[in-house]
Amino acid sequence: MKTKAAVLWGVNEPWSVEEVELGDPVAGEVRVKLAASGLCHSDEHLVTGDLPVPFPVVGGHEGAGVVEAVGPGVASVKEGDHVVLGFIPSCGKCVACSTGHTNLCDLGAGILGGPSIADGTFRVKARGQDTCTMCLLGTFSPYVVVHEHSVIKIEDDLPLDKAALVGCGVTTGFGSAVYAAEVAPGDTVVVVGCGGIGSNAIQGARIAGAERIIAVDPSESRREAAQVFGATHTAASVEEAAPLVTELTWGRMANKVILTAGVVTGDLIAPSLALTQKLGRVVVTGLAPFAQMDVQLSLLDLTLYEKELRGSLFGSANPRADIPKLLDLYRHGQLMLDELVTTTYALEDINQGYEDMRSHKNTRGMIVYD
C-alpha cells in the first residue's frame, strides 16, 4: 500500500514528508493504523548524527493504534486490537528476557540497523529504495508494519493518542526513577533535564514517595511545567542546584540524581556525583553522541563515599508488564499524560514540531493522524 511518511535522507537534513510504499506483513508481523506519534528527542539524534543509522530512514518510535492485519503465525494480537508499540522488541526467550530484563532483549541489537527482524528484508520503500525504520517501527507514518515482538495489547477504552506516550518517553522517565534509581519514600531526588523524559522521571519520583524533587533545566517554561508533575524545587543549572540541595538536606545532598538531558555530555558526571550523598546513585538515561568517550569524574569521590553511576535503557523497565501498569496509573489519576502534550501537529508540520522542541517550547510535541 502507499502511505505518507517523514523520511530522513541524511545528517542535518530536514524531515521530508513524502509518499512511500509499505509492504504487507509477513510471518510474525502485523500492520497497525496509528492514532498518534510522539516527537521524541531520540529521533533528533538521527538528525544530528549522534545516533548513526543507515539512510534513508523513516523516523518515529513512540506510537499507538489499531491492528489492521496480521501475518501468518501471529498469536499475541488480532485484527481490531488496540496496541502500543514498544521501541525495543522483546522475544521472551533470550537470557535478558528470561531474567526479567526485556528492555535488553537480544533483538534490540537490530533496532538501528535497518531490516525487519522477521526475514531480514525491508517493509518500506522511499523513492524506490529500501528504507530503514527507527527502532524497527517508523511511527512518523500513519501506517506501520512491525513484528509482534514490538506490539503490546492495551484496553480498548484508553485514548490512543495518550497511550502512544507510554511507548517510550513516559516509561523511560518513570522507570529511571522507580527502577534504575530505586527512589524510596522520603528521598531527595534531582532530575537534570525536564523535557519529555525528565518530566516523567519527576512523576516517577513523586509516585515512589520522594520528599523533595529538584528539577534542573535552563528553560523557565520547563521548570514551571516540572512543578505540575511533582517537582518541589527548581534550578536553572547543576551549579545552581548545588547550594539549594545543600541547604535542603543540611549538607547530606541528594539520594538520587537522574540525568535526562536531551544530550548528555561527559562534563555533567562530576557535578552530578557531587550532588549525590554517601551511597547515593547517579542514573544516566539521556543519550550521548555515539563517539563520545571522555567523562570527567572524581574517582576518589566515587570510592570514598561508595557512590554509584548507572546507565538505564527504557528506564530499566519491562515493556509488556510496565506499559499496561502505567496506563492503569493514568486511568486512576496517579500518572499525568494529558498534561505532557504541549502542542499537536500534522505530519506535514514535523519540522516545526522539532524546532519547537529545540527552542524548549514543548514538554512533548505529538503528531496526530486522522
Image: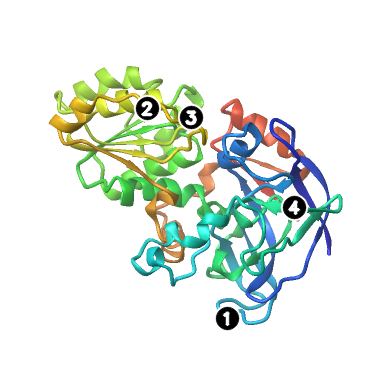
- Tag shown at residue 295: 2
Front-most of residues 291 and 71: 291
Front-most of residues 114 and 71: 114
Check disc 2 and report its element: helix, strand or loop.
Answer: loop
Circle 1 crowding by C-alpha within 10 Å: few under 14, some 14–19, many from 20:
few
- Residue 42, position in %: x, y? 56, 41
Mark 3 or mark 2, which is nearer the start of the sequence? 3
Residue at image location 64% in from the left, 57% down from the top: 137
- Tag shown at residue 131: 4
| Closer mark to the observer between disc 2 and disc 3 | 2
Mark 2 or mark 1, which is nearer the start of the sequence? 1
- Tag shown at residue 75: 1
| Closer mark to the observer between disc 1 and disc 4 | 4
Horizontal relation, residue 318 to residue 181: left or right? right
Q: Are marks 2 and 4 in contact (CB under 8 Å)?
A: no
Chosen colour scheme: rainbow
| Closer mark to the observer between disc 3 and disc 1 | 1
Q: Are marks 4 and 3 in contact (CB under 8 Å)?
A: no
Residue 243 vertical position relative to residue 29 in the rendered view, above or below: above
Please indicate, yes or no, whether residue 18 appears anywhere in the rendered image.
Answer: yes
Residue at image location 55% in from the left, 68% down from the top: 149
Horizontal relation, residue 161 to residue 246: left or right? right
Kind of residue at disc 1? Ala
Check disc 1 and report its element: helix, strand or loop.
Answer: loop
Mark 4 or mark 2, which is nearer the start of the sequence? 4
Q: Which residue is mark 3?
A: 222
The image quadrant of residue 105 is bottom left
Q: Locate the N terminus by quadrant.
A: bottom right
Mark 1 or mark 3, which is nearer the start of the sequence? 1
Horizontal relation, residue 345 to residue 166: left or right? right
Q: Are marks 2 and 3 in contact (CB under 8 Å)?
A: no
Kind of residue at disc 4? Thr
